[in-house]
Amino acid sequence: MDISDIGITEIAEAPPPLELKPADIEALADELVAYHAEFADLYYRVEQAHWGHMYMQGLMAPLNKSKTIQPMAMALEGGDIQAMQQFVGQGRWEDGKLLKKHWQLVDETLGEEDGVWIVDGSGFPKKGVHSVGVARQWCGQLGKIENCQEGAFAAYASRKGYTLLDRRLYLPEKWFDDDYRERWEKCGIPDDTTFKTEPELALDMLRSITTEGSLRFRWVTCDETYGKDPAFLDRVADLERWYFAEVPHSTRVWETQPKTAVPEWKGRGRRPTKEQLVTGEPAPQRVDEYAATIPKDEWKAYLIKEGSKGPMVAEFAFRRVIVVRDELPGPEVWLVLRRSLEEEPELKTYLSNASADTPYTALVRVAGMRWPVETALEDGKDNLGMDEYMVRSWIGWHHHMMLCILAHHFLVRVQKRLKRGPLP
């Protein structure tokens, strides 16, 4: 399809990319001191605050070598390999306090009432069997099943920019077998840790930030890993947030509310109590089959500012539908259909519990707002050593990721100040 022959609605509200690199801020050391001072009182001891600042300096140092602790410490004046290893891998400072302060600062920098909370998984290839949570599992970074650790990450995006918010390490089911108990002890995994799927880890992060209440956002967006889980979507709705979730093409919906009733008791056996579809009511339809029935004139083209590869044009169609829950009618939601403009178009399907009067342009905007979490993770891996750690412990993994998250927001914050004047 020639896009010059069709009318296009432009959605020009995408967050600006992070263009500032660590090498660009060597002259801004005082700014990092001031930024880290926001967190200094949240450590248990003064020396922990000192090494927190040093570690962030190392993450943003323009090193030619990897950003593991040894080269970072050697590049820093006053760096101490053993002290930095102990600080990250064994230090008992409570990173939850730093997270809460981080969310407050993100709201100052980027917060908007209709901000978007985004969740995605990220893999970290690892050799050996000693790192916490390592297993042969799908690794998105490599695009195949490989020995790796997997984490669930939350990010935030608004018209002002994007940054990372939180992280949780995924612990595979086999790590809960009895023959892994020795590894639990060596890795320092808390005894009360229970198996959780990635959607459950995402909900933990979402509940934490919603309860804290310091960061403004209306939307929650995610890919099929989370969107295919009805319980995840329903819990997001319970938290009074609007989800915009990519869902599998096999997801089923009704176009109109089907009739249900409790079957009449025939006088034998247990009296029925559960509603069922009334005989003769239509069966739910797959969303890809439903998309094929939508008239051509209902598809409208939108220009989306999506990702680092430039603008993207796609066609969208929108319908209100009833989703399936336990083979019965569930809530009424938006079905958003998106297809590319190639000769053989790729179809993407989304569900959203946004209000029925939500403008189409708002739905299209959020359809193009999942890339910030992917890009933020790329920023972290390419520039901040997010994937170059050598700690093996549970606490070490979470501490390292915490400091990478703070470093990323520091870059976002400085870029915003340099372009638009002093921060609040």
Image: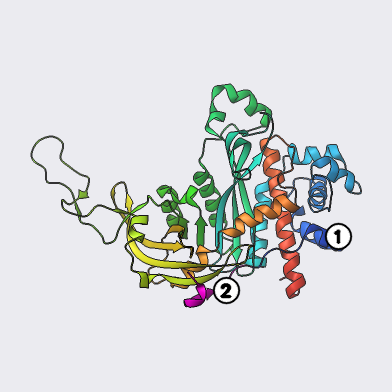
Residue located beneath label 2 in the image: 12
| Badge 2 density bin: few <14, some 14–19, many ≥20, Cα 10 Å | few
In this rendering, would 334 be left or right of 273? Answer: right
Most foreground residue, 121 or 398: 121
Q: Which residue is drawn at 58% across and 72% down?
A: 13
Quadrant where the C terminus sits is bottom right
Q: Which residue lies furthest to the top in this view?
A: 179
Task: Tell me which corner region of the image, top left, top right, bottom left or bottom right, holds residue 66.
Answer: top right
Q: What element carries label 1?
A: helix
Q: Residue furthest right?
A: 77
Q: Which residue is drawn at 36% across and 70% down?
A: 296
| Badge 1 density bin: few <14, some 14–19, many ≥20, Cα 10 Å | few
Residue located beneath label 1 in the image: 26
Whether residue 79 is visible, yes or no, is no
In this rendering, would 187 be left or right of 172? Answer: right
Q: Give the answer, above or below, for where 356 lies relative to 92.
A: below
Spatial separation of the CA atoms under disc 2 and disc 1: 33 Å
Does the magenta segment cover residue 7? yes
Q: Is mark 2 on a helix, strand or loop?
A: loop
